[in-house]
Image (tube, helix red, strand yellow):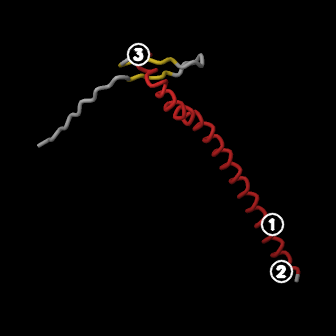
């Protein structure tokens, strides 16, 4: 037996921003229009803008993480080489004594 619950929403605005190769996003209104978008003194854009900026920053953060990981790997290789060098010196000193 399946129990399904359907809720009905009264949407006044449903829009999709489509990134364009030209650099200017295009907004497609599925429900509502530009007038509905501007209701409340542009509150929707005020709420939307930080999300869009955070999504754009994701790529920058990913690049910074990649650079940091590469630097960490390089540092680990250097530390390993230094450790091996010290061990070789100790070994040579013991053999010489």
Spot the residue most to the right.
96
**Residue at the image position 88 percent from the left and 80 percent from the top:** 96
**Which x, y percent locates residue 62?**
60, 41
Left or right, 83 with respect to 23, comes to right
The local crowd at label 3, few if under 14, some if 14 to 19, many if 20 or more residues have their Cα within 10 Å, is some
> Upstream in the sequence, badge 3 or badge 1?
3
CB atoms of marks 1 and 2 within 8 Å: no
Circle 1 sits on which residue?
85
> Upstream in the sequence, badge 3 or badge 2?
3
Circle 2 sits on which residue?
94
**Which x, y percent locates residue 58?**
57, 38
**Residue at the image position 19 percent from the left and 37 percent from the top:** 5
47 w.r.t. 73: above or below: above
Q: Secondary structure at mark 1?
A: helix
**Residue at the image position 68 percent from the left and 48 percent from the top:** 68
Spot the residue most to the bottom.
97
Left or right, 46 with respect to 65, comes to left
47 w.r.t. 42: above or below: below
Spot the residue most to the left.
1
Circle 3 sits on which residue?
33
Q: CA distance from mark 3 to mark 1?
A: 70 Å
**Which x, y percent locates residue 50?**
54, 34
> Upstream in the sequence, badge 1 or badge 2?
1
- Residue sitting nearer the eye, 27 or 47: 47
| The C terminus, quarter of image | bottom right
43 w.r.t. 76: above or below: above
| The N terminus, quarter of image | top left
Q: Secondary structure at mark 3?
A: loop
The local crowd at label 2, few if under 14, some if 14 to 19, many if 20 or more residues have their Cα within 10 Å, is few
Q: Nearer the viewer, mark 3 or mark 2?
A: 3
């Amino acid at each position: 037996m399946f129990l399904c619950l359907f809720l009905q929403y009264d949407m006044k605005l449903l829009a999709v921003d489509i990134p364009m190769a030209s650099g200017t996003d295009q907004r497609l209104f599925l429900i509502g229009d530009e007038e509905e978008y501007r209701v409340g003194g542009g509150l929707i854009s005020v709420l939307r803008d930080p999300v869009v900026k955070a999504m754009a920053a994701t790529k920058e953060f990913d690049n910074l993480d990649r650079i940091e990981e590469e630097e960490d790997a390089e540092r680990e290789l250097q530390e390993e080489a230094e450790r091996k060098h010290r061990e070789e010196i100790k070994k040579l000193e013991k053999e010489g004594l």
